């Protein structure tokens, strides 16, 4: 069928060169619109990323080597940094996704004060990670707000060292709280857009068939949200592997993580090879997690065909 | 003997030098500085120090020393230099000089020396082991302790706060813990871009005080003794110290009562609460009172677009009156031996620090240590070795001797790569410096 339509169209195009030009210009339009972003990404993202990849396999004099990976594995606190990064990540992602899901569902409902709620929830979106870390530092530090309140209420005699170097629980809790607070609104925005894309008829149909609110959420909304959740999870997991400012502000050197290690190798120790090696490790871990999400949260094609 | 010479009681020299050649506008000078980064310091530099310069200055403090060096090296390699004047510490000048990125300023120094007295030791640093002058001294500083007066009641019996030993410091911390229930000593042990200067405390203070040097005795029995003291001290040090970059902050909040740091990272406490804090020299150990000096210099990159302007700005910044102003603004000491910063008309905080620094320098067993020399790009990793040693021994509680043997190998590898000779207070070496 389509071949019959195409053949005369092609003949026509060949006979009239001007139309052919207009046709290809229209074809090019999307590329022209994408070009600025593509050039920007190539220059400032892809090119430095390729350079980083190359540096990780080079010695300081430019010769090729695999030594940097051994040096990274032997680096003091490398294992701790890897463990801490994963620990913080497995705590942050489920907590913030659950809260964000709840927030998105609440925001969709017609509750009183919904607009004010949305406004307040989006405040952390505008706060940088280091600033967020410093805000939470002023709360948790031993002469900070939390200790002052607890002391004023005579609940404690001496300040509690929430951020002491040997208080792993305190440090991790503070970091997870700060990071969840900072980024849950981002996840909420993504999920909200996903919920809005679900046709309301499906929900109404389920309701008329006698499904309760919980059943509708569990059986209708959540399965249809899977592609959106996949996007949110990929985005947040890759950024959680890079957790940096919050850790730097709250824990300093007490809780090494991969991104802080990488930064230290650049700014303090000036060994760009090792800094690049850490960066590549973060890249590999993020890529693996992305592949994992793509495989495990795969949405069957028929969902989209309905 | 290397002495940080802090002139006291000198008469203020007349402002304006004979070399202040012209009053004609020398144009715009791009001045990239790692010093004066705090917003109020940069603002003070622009409004109080640079305002009278007969040209315009773009005083740019957006980069730290560690970020400046690669930028300047890249500009040098590409032969596209857009910086006229560099203000940075000695350690950062080393890789720049090694790459041939700095001009020989010997003629300029000779011209300036006609009407101002530079501290000769600082001038010698600026030669960087050569016969040429690669930077003109600009500012100098040291590290010391600042003490909250509330802590004085807990001083060990018979101890003089201005002449403490490390054992007395640890004892003091133990007394404060007993008396207040809190660990009131603080050290700057944060890492990364908010990093503290703990490695300088170990290299320039603890090691010389216990082993007589920074490097050669790294794993000696004396070093083991030093680390036993560090462990004892750490047991009474605020466990949030791993988060401290600048000690003036926890001092002012009251989290910490006794702290060691760079003078410029302590000065706010002395400026803001002069009645509550006092500055005292660092403690001493069995081998003496090890201490370190920091020198910041002014250098002109090879190929600087406004050569004349840069030279005029160096002349301007090293005039006695401008030195005194700069001192007040950034909390360092002047580099001219006839400019006084102590006494009645001293800028707030600086005078108190100057007095402590003079006591430190003039202590009977003073043992001046240099910032690492000749390590070039390996300077950062050199400091990391000390920081990692601390992490393993104090934080992870690993066996002292094992850690010292491990880290000594890394230290030696760095010295070998850089082919660095020993520097004071370690005895001079004929070849690469060796950890014994």
Image (cartoon, coloured by chain):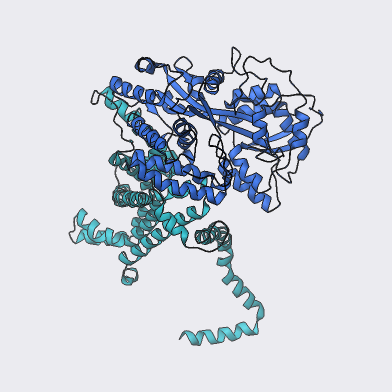
Residue B101's place in the image compared with A196, above or below, is above
Q: Position of residue A72 (x, y in %)?
A: 43, 54
Decide if residue B68 is on the left or right side of residue A238: right
Tell me the shade of chain B: blue
**The N terminus of chain B - image quarter:** top right
Q: Which chain is cyan?
A: A
- Taking the spot 43% from the left edge, 27% from the top edge, the residue there is B286
Q: Is residue A144 visible in this depiction of the protein?
A: yes
Q: How many marks?
A: 0
Using the image as rendered, state which of residue B426 and residue B379 is in the foreground. B426
Decide if residue A123 is on the left or right side of residue B85: left
Q: Quadrant of residue B169?
A: top left
Using the image as rendered, state which of residue A35 and residue B59 is in the foreground. B59
Q: Position of residue B323 (x, y in %)?
A: 66, 24
Q: Position of residue B131 (x, y in %)?
A: 71, 39
- Taking the spot 62% from the left edge, 17% from the top edge, the residue there is B8
Q: Quadrant of residue B284?
A: top left
Residue B289's place in the image compared with B220, above or below, is above
Q: Quadrant of residue A222?
A: bottom left
Decide if residue A159 is on the left or right side of residue A69: left
Using the image as rendered, state which of residue A202 and residue A222 is in the foreground. A222
Outermost residue to the top = B344
Outermost residue to the front = B430
Q: Is residue A115 visible in this depiction of the protein?
A: no
Decide if residue B61 is on the left or right side of residue A1: right
Q: Position of residue B261 (x, y in %)?
A: 48, 29
């Amino acid at each position: 069928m389509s071949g019959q339509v195409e053949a005369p169209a092609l003949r026509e195009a060949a006979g009239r060169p001007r139309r052919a030009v207009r046709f290809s210009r229209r074809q090019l339009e999307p590329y022209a619109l994408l070009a600025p972003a593509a050039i920007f990404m190539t220059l400032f993202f892809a090119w430095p990323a390729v350079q980083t990849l190359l540096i990780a396999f080079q010695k300081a004099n430019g010769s090729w080597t695999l030594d940097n990976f051994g040096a990274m594995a032997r680096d003091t606190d490398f294992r701790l940094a890897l463990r801490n990064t994963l620990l913080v990540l497995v705590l942050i992602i489920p907590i913030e996704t659950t809260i964000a899901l709840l927030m998105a569902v609440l925001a969709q409902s017609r509750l009183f004060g919904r607009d004010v709620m949305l406004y307040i929830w989006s405040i952390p979106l505008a706060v940088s990670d280091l600033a967020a870390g410093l805000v939470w530092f002023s709360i948790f530090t031993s002469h900070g707000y939390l200790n002052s309140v607890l002391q004023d209420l005579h609940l404690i005699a001496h300040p509690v060292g929430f951020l002491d170097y040997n208080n792993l629980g305190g440090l991790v809790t503070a970091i997870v709280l700060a990071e969840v607070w900072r980024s849950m609104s981002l996840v909420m925005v993504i999920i909200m857009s996903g919920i809005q894309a679900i046709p309301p008829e499906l929900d109404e149909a389920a309701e008329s068939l006698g499904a309760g609110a919980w059943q509708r959420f569990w059986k209708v909304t959540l399965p249809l949200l899977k592609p959106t959740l996949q996007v949110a999870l990929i985005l947040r997991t890759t950024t959680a592997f890079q957790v940096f400012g919050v850790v730097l502000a709250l824990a300093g050197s007490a809780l090494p993580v991969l991104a802080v290690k990488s930064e230290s190798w650049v700014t303090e120790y000036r060994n760009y090879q090792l800094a690049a090696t850490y960066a590549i490790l973060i890249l590999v871990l993020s890529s693996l997690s992305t592949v994992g999400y793509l495989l495990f949260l795969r949405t069957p094609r028929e969902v989209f065909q309905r | 003997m290397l002495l940080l010479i802090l002139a006291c009681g000198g008469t203020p020299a007349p402002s304006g030098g004979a070399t202040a050649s012209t009053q004609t506008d020398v144009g715009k000078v791009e001045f990239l500085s790692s010093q004066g980064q705090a917003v109020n310091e940069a603002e003070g530099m622009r409004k109080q120090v640079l305002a009278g310069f007969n040209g315009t200055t773009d005083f740019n403090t957006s980069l730290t020393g560690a970020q400046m060096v690669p930028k300047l090296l890249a500009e040098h390699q590409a032969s596209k230099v857009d910086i006229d004047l560099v203000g940075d510490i000695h350690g950062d000048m080393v890789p720049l000089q090694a790459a041939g990125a700095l001009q020989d300023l010997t003629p300029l120094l000779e011209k300036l020396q006609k009407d101002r007295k530079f501290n000769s030791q600082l001038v010698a640093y600026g030669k960087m082991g050569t016969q040429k002058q690669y930077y003109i001294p600009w500012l100098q500083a040291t590290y010391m302790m600042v003490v909250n007066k509330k802590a004085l009641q807990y001083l060990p019996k018979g101890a003089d706060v201005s002449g403490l030993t490390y054992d007395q410091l640890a004892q003091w911390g133990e007394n404060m813990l007993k008396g207040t229930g809190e660990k009131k000593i603080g050290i700057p042990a944060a890492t990364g871009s908010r990093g503290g200067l703990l490695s300088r405390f170990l290299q320039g203070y603890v090691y010389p005080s216990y082993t007589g040097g920074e490097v050669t005795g790294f794993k000696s029995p004396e070093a083991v003794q030093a680390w036993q003291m560090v462990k004892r001290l750490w047991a009474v040090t605020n466990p949030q110290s791993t988060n401290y970059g600048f000690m003036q902050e926890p001092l002012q909040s009251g989290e910490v009562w006794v702290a060691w740091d760079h003078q410029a990272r302590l000065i706010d406490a002395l400026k803001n609460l002069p009645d509550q804090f006092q500055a005292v020299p660092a403690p001493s150990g069995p081998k003496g009172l090890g201490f370190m000096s920091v020198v910041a210099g002014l250098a002109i990159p090879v190929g600087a677009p406004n050569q004349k302007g840069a030279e005029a700005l160096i002349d301007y910044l090293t005039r006695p009156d401008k030195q005194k102003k700069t001192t007040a603004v950034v909390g360092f000491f002047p580099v001219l031996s006839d400019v006084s910063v102590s006494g009645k008309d001293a800028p707030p905080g600086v005078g108190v620090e100057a007095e402590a620094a003079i006591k430190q320098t003039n202590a009977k067993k003073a043992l001046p240590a240099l910032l690492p020399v000749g390590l070039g790009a390996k300077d950062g990793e050199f400091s990391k070795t000390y920081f990692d040693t601390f992490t393993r021994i104090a934080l992870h509680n690993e066996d002292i001797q094992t850690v010292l043997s491990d880290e000594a190998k890394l230290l030696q590898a760095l010295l070998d790569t850089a082919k660095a000779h020993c520097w004071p207070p370690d005895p001079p070496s004929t070849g690469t410096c060796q950890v014994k």
